Image: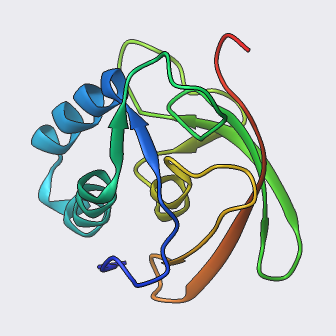
């Protein structure tokens, strides 16, 4: 999961408001999240930071996203950041998971590879994104 940015990684975007939330989360993560924290930091560092007026669909906190894995299986869920004050969505994909980190900032049609917790390499392709308020 200690994934380095690879040549050919798709460009990603992160909303400025989401960046602040993610940075606060990264500052507070316990050592048990060190590997996922590094992955998330690397994704944030390579992202173009945009404001809420940007056009186009991309995965952000609160987005409902459908994606396929390398075997062609379809998955869907809502990307969220765990917060004590709010319940997790029933179809939630935590940003503190490898797949959640990998999805962040991707647009439909983009593909990315990532390492799972058990060190397997997986690949996903975003099919559709519905952002909060759409």
- Location of the C terminus by quadrant is top right
Locate residue 120, reporting x and y percent: 54, 89
Percent from the top left, x then y, of residue 105?
50, 47
Name the foreground residue: 96 vs 57. Answer: 57
Q: Residue at x 49, y 16 (%)?
A: 53
Left or right, 118 with respect to 65, comes to left
Quick check: 68 above or below 86? below
Q: Position of residue 133 (x, y in %)?
A: 67, 10
From the top left corner, tell me how far across and down residue 125 is, in percent: 72, 65
Instruction: Determine whether, in the image, residue 74 is placed left or right of residue 111.
Output: right
User: Who's the residue at 23% across and 27% down the image?
Assistant: 20
Q: Quadrant of residue 69?
A: bottom right
Question: Residue at coordinates 34% horizontally, 51% vertically from top-left?
Answer: 47
Q: Can you say whether 53 is above or below 76 in the image?
A: above
In the image, taking residue 8 as reference, residue 14 lies left or right, namely: left
Q: The N terminus lies in which quarter of the figure? A: bottom left
| Residue 55 lies in quadrant | top right
């Amino acid at each position: 999961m200690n994934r380095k940015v690879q040549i050919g990684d798709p460009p990603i975007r992160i909303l400025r408001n989401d960046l602040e939330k993610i940075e606060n989360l990264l500052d507070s993560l316990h050592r048990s999240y060190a590997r996922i924290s590094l992955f998330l930091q690397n994704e944030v560092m390579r992202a173009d930071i945009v404001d809420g007026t940007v056009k186009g669909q991309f995965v952000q906190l609160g987005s409902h996203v459908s994606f396929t894995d390398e075997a062609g299986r379809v998955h869907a869920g809502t990307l969220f950041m765990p917060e004590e004050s709010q319940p997790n969505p029933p179809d939630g994909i935590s940003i503190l998971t490898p797949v959640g980190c990998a999805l962040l900032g991707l647009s439909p049609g983009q593909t990315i590879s990532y390492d799972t917790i058990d060190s397997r390499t997986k690949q996903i392709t975003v099919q559709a994104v519905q952002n909060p308020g759409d």
